[in-house]
């Protein structure tokens, strides 16, 4: 998991940029003007699918998961680098708890 602590990503811009290279499913969750929520404006979630990597992302959090066994492709690594750039933190808060780690993975050799 990766996080943003500040202003969330603009998901329309993220979708536009990633749709050039990846398959994207978008979910817009309902809200109402009477709802009490800190993040009611952030009700968009994208599921971006690479070759062996899938990313669920909203404006403040991205969850990366491997959907098929095998080494990641160059395309998967492009998606991973995009996520690491847009979601630079590895825990949801600046407070020193809830650390996440990335497991080791393989990358396909270029031909």
Image (tube, grey):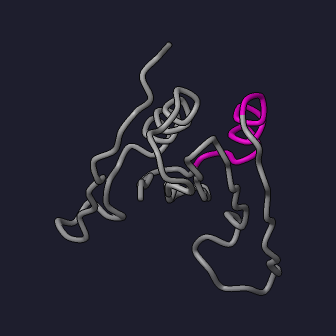
Tell me: residue 56, above or below residue 84: below
Tell me: residue 81, above or below residue 37: above
Q: Is residue 17 magenta?
A: yes
In this rendered view, identify the residue nearer to me: 29 or 19.
19
In this rendered view, identify the residue nearer to me: 36 or 79.
79
Q: Residue furthest top?
A: 111
Overall secondary structure of the magenta stretch?
helix
Q: Residue furthest left?
A: 96
Query: Bounds of the magenta span?
Result: 9-21
Q: Give the residue displayed 57% in from the left and 46% down from the top.
A: 52
* Quadrant in the rendering for residue 84: top left
* Residue 58 located left or right of residue 23: left
Number of numbered markers: 0
Q: Is residue 50 magenta?
A: no
Tell me: residue 55, above or below residue 28: above
In this rendered view, identify the residue nearer to me: 101 or 107.
107
* Residue 65 located left or right of residue 36: left
Q: Give the residue displayed 61% in from the left and 59% down from the top.
A: 58
Q: Position of residue 64 (x, y in %)?
A: 49, 55
Q: Quadrant of the N terminus?
A: bottom left
* Residue 31 located left or right of residue 3: right
Q: Position of residue 95 (x, y in %)?
A: 22, 66
Q: Give the residue displayed 64% in from the left and 42% down from the top.
A: 50
Q: Position of residue 106 (x, y in %)?
A: 36, 38
Q: Position of residue 92 (x, y in %)?
A: 36, 64
């Amino acid at each position: 998991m990766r996080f943003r602590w500040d202003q969330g990503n603009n998901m329309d811009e993220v979708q536009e940029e990633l749709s050039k290279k990846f398959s994207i499913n978008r979910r817009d969750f309902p809200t109402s003007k009477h709802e009490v929520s800190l993040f009611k404006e952030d009700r968009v979630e994208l599921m971006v699918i690479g070759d062996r990597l899938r990313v669920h992302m909203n404006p403040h959090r991205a969850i990366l998961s491997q959907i098929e066994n095998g080494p990641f492709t160059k395309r998967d690594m492009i998606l991973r680098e995009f996520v690491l750039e847009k979601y630079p933190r590895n825990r949801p808060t600046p407070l020193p708890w809830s650390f996440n780690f990335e497991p080791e993975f393989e990358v396909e050799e270029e031909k």
